[in-house]
Image (tube, helix red, strand yellow):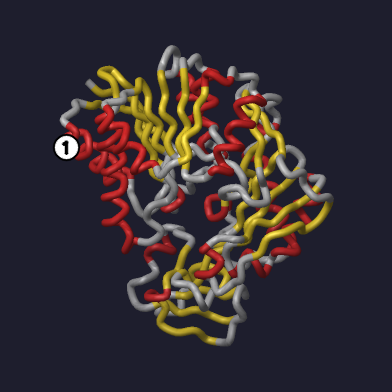
Amino acid sequence: MAVVVLKPGREESLRRRHPWVFSGAVQNVRGNPEPGGIVDVCSSRGEWLAAGAWSPSSQIRVRIWSFTRGEEIDEVFFRDRLERSLHARSKLLSRSDLTACRLVNAESDGLPGLIVDGYGDILVCQFLSAGAESCRDVIVKFLEELVGPSGIYERSDTEARTKEGLPERCGMISGKEPPDLVEISEHGARFLVDVRKGHKTGFYLDQRDNRLAVREFSRGAEVLNCFSYSGAFGISALLGGAREVTNVDSSGEALELARKNALLNGLAEGAFRFKDADVFRCLRDLRDKGRTYDLVVLDPPKFAGSAGQVPSASRGYKDINLLAFKILNPGGILFTFSCSGHIVPALFQKIVADAALDAGREAVIIRYLGQASDHPVALPFPEGQYLKGLICTVS
């Protein structure tokens, strides 16, 4: 087996069981591992630290499979990891009001680079690292055996694949083709999901608990749902008793899906509106017209895909939050989110605080929000906490 030798002093993160080895930590490589091949990782003094998957094209050169010396990275290993992931979600999977769930959450489930989402009896997979790619057939075999889906669809069409030196790929892996729109249920709501072309694997499963929180604050409110995608936050608001919801998104296709979702839930057409517009421009226009709302949801896409994009992303987050504070009624509620992992929670709170200050509004945080429980965060892997949110009241 090939051996990756670390530079002196660069082994401490692995001692703390962080699952990544960056290129800058590598002193040399003994042997000629193939992309995705299994390598031992050793300190500069020759101490064995971990076994992982080699990725020569990525800044993350090794993603760790195991910290247990002598553990074989074989079919038994992958079956065990998948069984553990499914068992950890057994309570969610047994709920009758929930038919969509993340089954494998990559590093935090001990399977770096692998995402598996279940939508009813259809699984959608992402193989995002060289290691996950090399084990694709084994993983698919055990998913078929352990879950028994009607079909497995692949959505390995993200920038993460490019960084790993892998081509993007989408399409059926096994079983029958999914319908154009897959229907799922969540907390009594119904949603249509486009697993072929929709965002991520088709739906923002990580926002499940936060959609329920929106219901809690929506009774009698006039709501503005920004970056609305398929309208899930807006539907949750209406199911919570909102008087009216306006969904804003720059994608006409997403707004049409949002309309279908609203009708699927039996909501009166007069209670929801759809605006095909750039959210930044729309918020400025609403501010200039003096239009106000009781509740605003800001759930933008990832603004910072790398550390170098943090300054520009911070400006973007501040801009939309400042405008949202401007258009909230006294006593209004702001739900604001960042899904950019490079924007840490303390920085996000500072950005929102500065936005409130510049908007001339007094605001307090009444709740911190994060990703749903089927998107766990391994304790040694803080990068797994990518989604952060705040519920703020303004005066």
Residue 225: image quadrant is: top left
- Determine the secondary structure under disc 1: helix
User: How many marks overall?
Assistant: 1
Residue at 46% x, 50% y is: 384
The residue lying toward the viewer, choosing from 395 and 75, is 395
| Residue 273 image position (x, y, % from top left) | 50, 27
Residue farthest to the front, as pictured: 289
Residue at 34% x, 77% y is: 8
| Residue 90 image position (x, y, % from top left) | 67, 35
The residue lying toward the viewer, choosing from 166 and 68, is 166
| Residue 156 image position (x, y, % from top left) | 62, 60
Q: Write down the residue under mark 1.
A: 358
Q: Examine the rendered structure and indicate whether residue 205 appears above or below residue 199.
A: above
Q: Is residue 340 left or right of residue 140?
A: left
The residue lying toward the viewer, choosing from 91 and 69, is 91
| Residue 115 image position (x, y, % from top left) | 61, 53
Dividing the image into 4 quarters, which one contains the C terminus?
Answer: top left
Q: Is residue 234 left or right of residue 323?
A: right
Under mark 1, the amino acid is: Asp
Q: Examine the rendered structure and indicate whether residue 52 appears above or below residue 171.
A: below
Residue 66: image quadrant is: bottom right
Residue at 56% x, 41% y is: 254
Residue neighbourhood size for the residue with mark 1, other residues' Cα within 10 Å, grouped as few (<14), some (14–19), many (≥20): some
Dividing the image into 4 quarters, which one contains the N terminus?
Answer: bottom right
Residue at 34% x, 28% y is: 334
Q: Examine the rendered structure and indicate whether residue 103 appears above or below residue 187.
A: below
